[in-house]
Image (cartoon, rainbow, N blue to C red):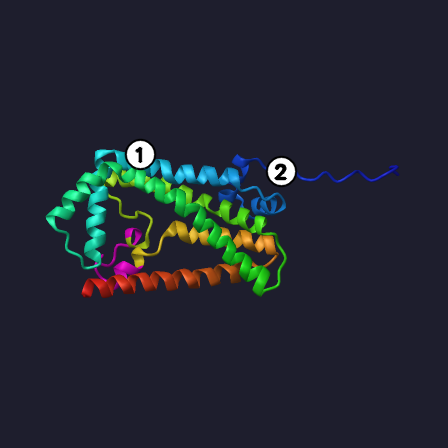
Amino acid sequence: MPDSLPLRVAPQARGLAARVVGVLTSPRATYADIAARPHWLGVTIVVMAATILPVMWLLQTDVGRRAGIDMQLQTLESFGRTVTDEEYRQMERMAPYAGYFSAAAQLFAFPLFTLAIAAIAYAIFNGALGADAAFRQVFAVVAHSNVVTGLRTLFSTPLNYARESMSNPTSLAATLPFFEENTFAGRLLGSIDLFFIWWIVSLAIGLGVLYKRRTTPIATSMFVVYGAIALTIAAVRSMLAGA
């Protein structure tokens, strides 16, 4: 008989690269590590770089500038707006700066979005459901789930350059082109993104691991909210276009 039982060695902490890859390939084990060691700054920088830099590059090219102007025209027209010649010339004058405007908007919106989602999750689970987790843990889970949205930009940018278009290539409207863009069904499918569906599943797994709850009810609730938002956007765009 051995004199003593061997000591159980705690799993080694995953590095930043392993966590980024793990969110995509083995989310449950990765989120367990994130919950135990809630680091968020490194992954936030990585995701913001993956989100901002490709779009800045695209909007600095002639293809990206033309696509950006076309996207603005399509967006305004989808809301029933008619663009005047002066407004079009203004778009052309501002096109060289579009990449910088996009970067500035992302630098502001991305942390705010992450903070808002973390605050909502914390309020629901810790407040309404009486669970127990530190806000730092919730924020770290949300920050790591954003790896999926960063991958979306890396995937979409070369496609947009090849297509000479800034329209979303990962929406259901792009993958299931059964309806015209100016119909309600087309607008609804255009409001639903495959990568955001992946992001919801990833975040639901992370919150389920953190709070030791089943993933399916969390994901279902988030899908209901996402669907309601998509329906609202499609309805508003249809009403404005009709007006």
Query: Residue under circle 1?
Result: 57
Viewer-nearest residue: 18 or 16: 16
The quarter of the picture where the N terminus appears is: top right
| SS class, disc 1 | helix
* Circle on res. 13: 2
Left or right: 202 with respect to 77? right
Q: Position of residue 8 (x, y in %)?
A: 75, 40
Quarter containing the C terminus: bottom left
- Point 46% across, 38% down: residue: 45
Locate residue 50, reporting x and y percent.
Answer: 40, 38
User: In the image, what residue occupies the spot 14% across and 55% down?
Assistant: 82
- Looking at the rendered structure, the secondary structure element under dot 2 is loop
Relative placement, left or right, of 85 versus 136 is left
Dot 1 crowding, Cα within 10 Å, few <14, some 14–19, many 20+ = few
Residue drawn at 23 percent across, 36 percent down = 96
Whole-percent x and y of residue 35? 60, 47
The span from disc 1 to disc 2 (Cα, nearest Å) is 35 Å
- What type is the residue that disc 1 sits on? Trp
What segment is highlighted magenta in the picture?
Answer: 174-188
Instruction: Tell me what residue is drawn at x 27 percent, y 59 percent.
Output: 187
Farthest residue in the left direction? 85
Q: Does the stretch in magenta take in 182?
A: yes
Asked whether residue 17 is drawn in magenta, I would say: no
Say if residue 21 shows up in the picture: no
